[in-house]
Amino acid sequence: MKAIATIILFLFIGAAAQANTTAKEVKVTTIEMSIVTDIVIQETVKLEKTTEVARLYRRKNSMVKKALAFTTKRNRPKMA
């Protein structure tokens, strides 16, 4: 009896879900745009005469680890 009631319940829910189709087709207005093919790009390169030092690290997080590895006076061990 329980199996029959479950099958009827599923059939009823399935029929109700299929009957709930109220979607209408909405027409979308399209816009035509022309393609511009005459594009001129001017690139200028500025050279600066400043010399800066760049550091190279073996690992990508070495600067972060160095910044997080700071010590304070309270972190230092005390002599007994």
Image (tube, rainbow, N blue to C red):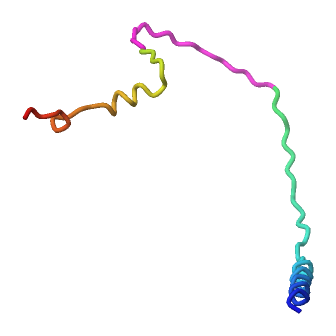
- Give the residue displayed 89% in from the left and 79% down from the top: 14
The quarter of the picture where the N terminus appears is bottom right
Q: Is residue 48 left or right of residue 75?
A: right
- Give the residue displayed 90% in from the left and 72% down from the top: 24
Image quarter of residue 34: top right
Give the camera-side residue of 41 and 8.
8
Q: How far from the left and from the top, in percent, is residue 33?
A: 84, 42
Q: Is residue 44 left or right of residue 18?
A: left
The quarter of the picture where the C terminus appears is top left
Q: Which residues are magenta?
A: 38-54
Q: How far from the left and from the top, in percent, is residue 54?
A: 42, 14
- Give the residue displayed 73% in from the left and 21% down from the top: 40
Image quarter of residue 19: bottom right
Q: Is residue 31 left or right of residue 75?
A: right
From the image, give the main secondary structure of the stretch colored magenta.
loop
Give the camera-side residue of 77 and 55.
77
Magenta segment: does it hold 50? yes
Q: How far from the left and from the top, in percent, is residue 74?
A: 16, 38
Q: How far from the left and from the top, in percent, is residue 31?
A: 85, 50
Image quarter of residue 39: top right
